[in-house]
Image: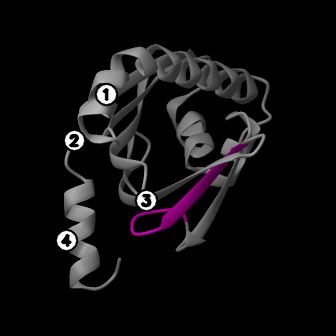
Amino acid sequence: MTGPEGADDLREAAQPGAGEVTATVIVHAPAERVFAALLAWERQSDWIPFTRVAVVEGDGREGSLVEAVTTLGPLVLRDEMRVVRVDEPYEINVVHCGRLLRGPGVLRCTQMARDRTQVVWHEWFHVPGGRAGQLAWPVLWPGSKVSLTQALKRFARLVEQGRLP
């Protein structure tokens, strides 16, 4: 995605899709620590079930390519994300730019008090499968929301226990 065609593809993938999902959690830790844990891409494997995450290009910050591979039995889902903006300690913006998962996403940290930080994870996926995919999304959405919320709760526990980053 470094040439002109790749740039066009990234611009197209960056457009919000119809598959919108949001999860939120309160972490009992300062925003700087929470943000550092979110930016520790490889450690997402500790809090997102069945998933291995690696930085495959760059240093994990702006311009980097991050790959998350989720394996559930024989099913394998590859999620490629380009990190497009890092505003430390507040926000990380990515664009999912793989063949199946596409669309922008954001992780936001908001300091609420000295030791409490709200984390919001918001995704706007392009729903694959044309009209059939769009019709299926309302059925799939609750599972996506529950999965994201459970992952963030696990993330919060690990940060609060000092096990992340």
Residue 120, quarter of picture: top left
Q: Which residue is mark 3?
A: 98
Q: Disc 4 marks which amino acid?
A: Asp
Q: Disc 3 marks which amino acid?
A: Gly
- Which class describes the residues within 10 Å of circle 3: few (<14), some (14-19), or many (20+)? some
Of pointers 4 and 3, the one earlier in the residue sequence: 4
18 versus 28 height, above or below: below
Q: Which residue is mark 1?
A: 20
Q: Which residue is mark 2?
A: 16
Q: Which residues are magenta?
A: 60-71
Residues at marks 2 and 4, CA–CA distance in whole angstroms: 15 Å
Residues at marks 1 and 4, CA–CA distance in whole angstroms: 22 Å
Residues at marks 3 and 1, CA–CA distance in whole angstroms: 17 Å
Secondary element under disc 2, as helix, strand or loop, is loop
- Which class describes the residues within 10 Å of circle 4: few (<14), some (14-19), or many (20+)? few
Residue 117 located within the stretch drawn in magenta: no
Pointers 1 and 4 in contact (C-beta within 8 Å): no
Of pointers 1 and 4, the one earlier in the residue sequence: 4
Asked whether residue 57 appears in the rendered view, the answer is yes
Tell how many labels.
4
Place of residue 26 in the rendered image (x, y in percent of width and height, measured from the top left) = 53, 15
Of circles 3 and 2, the one toward us is 3
Place of residue 138 in the rendered image (x, y in percent of width and height, measured from the top left) = 34, 16
Of pointers 2 and 4, the one earlier in the residue sequence: 4
42 versus 137 height, above or below: below
Name which residue lies at 64% across and 52% down: 69
Place of residue 20 in the rendered image (x, y in percent of width and height, measured from the top left) = 31, 28
Instruction: Tell whether 123 sits left or right of 4.
Output: right
Residues at marks 4 and 3, CA–CA distance in whole angstroms: 14 Å
Place of residue 32 in the rendered image (x, y in percent of width and height, measured from the top left) = 53, 38
Q: Disc 2 marks which amino acid?
A: Pro
Instruction: Tell whether 157 sits left or right of 12.
Output: right
